[in-house]
Image (cartoon, grey):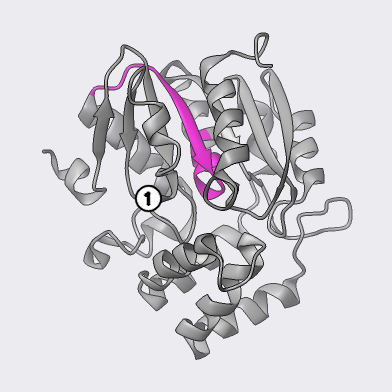
Amino acid sequence: MGIVEEAHNVRIVGRGNEIVVLAHGFGTDQSVWKHLVPHLVDDYRVILYDNMGAGTTNPEYFDFDRYYTIHGFAYDLLAIFEELEVKSCIFVGHSLSAMVGLLASISHPHLFTKLILVSASPRFLNDSEYFGGFQPEDLKQLYDGIRSNYKAWCSGFAPLVIGGDMESVAVQEFSRTLFNMRPDIALSLAQTIFEFDLRSILGLVTVPCHIIQSTKDLAAPVVVAEYLRLNLGGKTIVEVMPTEGHLPQLSAPDVVIPVLLNHIRHDLAEAK
């Protein structure tokens, strides 16, 4: 196993000529795809990895300067592709990783046959002509919570993001992976993610994009999915699912897995 593979806990499962890459968002790790993977392994070679900073990675490898912007994650993704000799893939990215996939595709479009973007947002902060879902004061409260009592913040943040109560399995699972992160790394990543603005690069994306969205998502409202559709440079399709929360692949797998499989198996003209 190469250095990059080891650092990112790269795991390759399944068989098939086509590669599907599954990439997770903030506060989770590759286990967030556990409901989807069994449905792919008979037909695809599936690559899973952990973003640097996830609780499953070595915190000593986390470079605060490198991940000050999400470009660091795009460089990581391309390094994984290079080490594994990936020539082409279907990329499924959740939240942060949806935008990482978009960034990587701009410089290396030949590596992606399509991008499937789950709960994606190019900008979380509102401004005068854009609704991202958050005001600056919301972010100040979020950062203060992480600084003051990380465990308590995790317990409060998880049900808000998932859209359920603390008793739900999905909330407990997200709380676990969130709490596994080192607090200073979680704070740094939260600042990187919640303050980025990638709206200006959307028109440079030429790879076909499938946008998958919950009806109700605190972190990525439905209007953001429509904004992506209107501003991405390539062909796009949006599917809004009757689900709630930012991690529907974890909280509502019975609804989400068939949708994801449809978009993985069918290209834009064929998606049903």
Where is residue 169 shown, x and y percent of the image?
Answer: 50, 62
**Which residue was labeled with disc 1?**
31
The quadrant in which residue 217 appears is bottom right
Where is residue 178 shown, x and y percent of the image?
Answer: 44, 68
Q: Quadrant of the N terminus?
A: top left
User: Is 82 displayed left or right of 20 in the figure?
Assistant: left
| 78 and 134: which is toward the camera | 134
Instruction: State yes or no: residue 173 in magenta.
Output: no
Q: Quadrant of the C terminus?
A: top right
| 200 and 212: which is toward the camera | 212
Q: Secondary structure at mark 1?
A: helix
Residue, x 40% and y 76% (percent of image)?
Answer: 184
In the image, the segment drawn in magenta is 85-101
Q: Is residue 169 above or below residue 138?
A: above
The residue lying furthest to the left in this view is 1
Residue, x 52% and y 22% (percent of image)?
Answer: 264
**Residue type at tag 1:** Ser
Instruction: State yes or no: residue 93 in magenta.
Output: yes
| Disc 1 residue crowd, few under 14, some 14–19, many 20+, Cα 10 Å | some
Residue, x 52% and y 36% (percent of image)?
Answer: 103
